[in-house]
Amino acid sequence: MQDPATAPATTPGTALSAHHIVTTALDLAEREGPAALTMRRLGREMGVDATAFYRHFRDKDELVLAIGDRMIGQVLADLRADSPANADPAASEDWRDVLRRIAAALLGQVHVRPAVFSMVFARTTGGPSERQVVEMILAALAPLGLPPERVVLLYRLFIDTLLSLGGMSATVRTLPPEIIEKDASAWSRVYAGMPHADFPATREHATALVAVTDDSIYDAAVDSLIFFIESQVPTDRRS
Amino acid sequence: MQDPATAPATTPGTALSAHHIVTTALDLAEREGPAALTMRRLGREMGVDATAFYRHFRDKDELVLAIGDRMIGQVLADLRADSPANADPAASEDWRDVLRRIAAALLGQVHVRPAVFSMVFARTTGGPSERQVVEMILAALAPLGLPPERVVLLYRLFIDTLLSLGGMSATVRTLPPEIIEKDASAWSRVYAGMPHADFPATREHATALVAVTDDSIYDAAVDSLIFFIESQVPTDRRS
DNA sequence: ACCTGAACACCGTTCAAGT
DNA sequence: ACCTGAACACCGTTCAAGT
């Protein structure tokens, strides 16, 4: 609690902090879309001049990465929350379950913070949360008896596939509404009124095509990745 | 050849056409990055006012989609060029080879047109080239004896995984140079100077981690996807 | 130490006017 | 029919000035 009389008259209770800026920026991006996250708009939101943020972040990119770091922190928090190690810290979890839990936590953020996810999925923050997720995946794959080059390739295949699939889905979700409409109608046109003679396979699958969801594709990707990794594991380490 | 005397003095030999606009815009984006593709910059490039393009495209998004369509057209051209059906039109190619050729053609555009790829990989143009690629993949998977819902899921898994992995790679490639540097150094920091006690798996794989390339990940994804699809095919249809 | 405000060099897009 | 040019409502960022 700050005494209103001693607080500077120009900024009544609106002291900026990196944490508070990130919180407000994240909310703004999710509420109105990635394009609404501008320095000026954020300034209006927080009652300060647009240029005030440059005291806390070198440039807008730094701010966006900080928002991304906040999101990865949530991924990590979700992972800890439903970890079986909470019940039995000594139990070493099956690597498949570790990967499935990480995949689920990432997909959760695609749903709950699509704007942020679309802004940072191709970027690296190098923050502490990111490092811990990296360590979790590598620690799960390391005991499988594969050469290190193979381990890191499978690690990157896993994380890059899920980040990019999630990022694509999040990007589409946060496009301006009129463009989402255009994209959707483009697919309808592709699948529907097509010359039967030239596009037999597409016509045959038109009904099924419109029913596929991004989440079912993501789930299939997780199954596919685990199935592929399993196939590389020496038979004596399979379980 | 146009008589210089009869050509309008204001636009000497610079008549705009949708095709010419797309060509110049694509070149500009690849030459100077996606951020350099602005209406004003393109106008300067072509010697016309920035607002002249609105006679040919409804808005900038339409122009970007047209550029994307041009790129997919190249994918299709590449596919036709190295199709074995050129030699023997009666031969029906193994579905694995069809998928591998499509994957290779997409990756080719990631390399040769990363800026365009990064701008459109999450979008749908609904153009004729796109339709033909869709038909190619569905026609390859249709004879495998799977229910239509399964066919379309595997089709989407295949195309979405490769588009999004390629898109992520292309996005990183076309980031402003100083940001690429920041991203790369972020990874070095993650992999290198980390507390050995807390990140044993990361430390163990530090050397191997920096050696993984986007292309090797993409290739592994193609292998993984084909391996997964194979596993779903009824045994009597495997070959 | 932290924020303001003017300024610079940009954006996409609309619309009346020119040829 | 096609392009121009002024105008509107925006951007990110720098820097001198304020408190």
Image: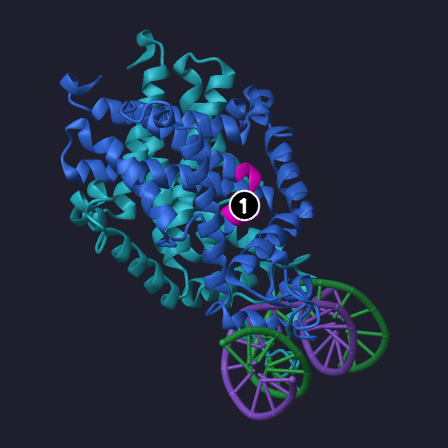
Chain colours: A blue, B cyan, C green, D purple
- The percent coordinates of residue B70 (x first, y second) are 49, 51
Residue A33 in sight from this viewpoint: yes
Near-viewer residue (A57 or B220): A57
Q: Tell me what residue is drawn at x 41 percent, y 34 percent.
A: A79
Indicate left or right for A123 with A141 as reference.
right
Q: Which chain carries label 1?
A: A
Indicate left or right for B19 with A181 as reference.
left
Numbered range of the magenta stretch: A110-117
Which amino acid lies under the numbered mark 1 shown in the image of this protein?
Thr
Q: Predominant secondary structure in magenta?
A: helix
Residue that label 1 marks: A171
Q: Tell me what residue is drawn at x 25 percent, y 48 percent.
A: B213
Indicate left or right for B130 with B93 as reference.
right
- The percent coordinates of residue A72 (x first, y second) are 44, 45
Near-viewer residue (A62 or A177): A62
Residue B125 in sight from this viewpoint: no
- The percent coordinates of residue A61 (x first, y second) are 47, 63
Assign the C terminus of chain B to one quadrant of the image. top left
For residue A177, which quarter of the picture?
A: top right
For residue A49, which quarter of the picture?
A: bottom right
Q: Tell me what residue is drawn at x 25 percent, y 23 percent.
A: A230
Look at the image and say whether residue B237 sits in the magenta stretch. Answer: no
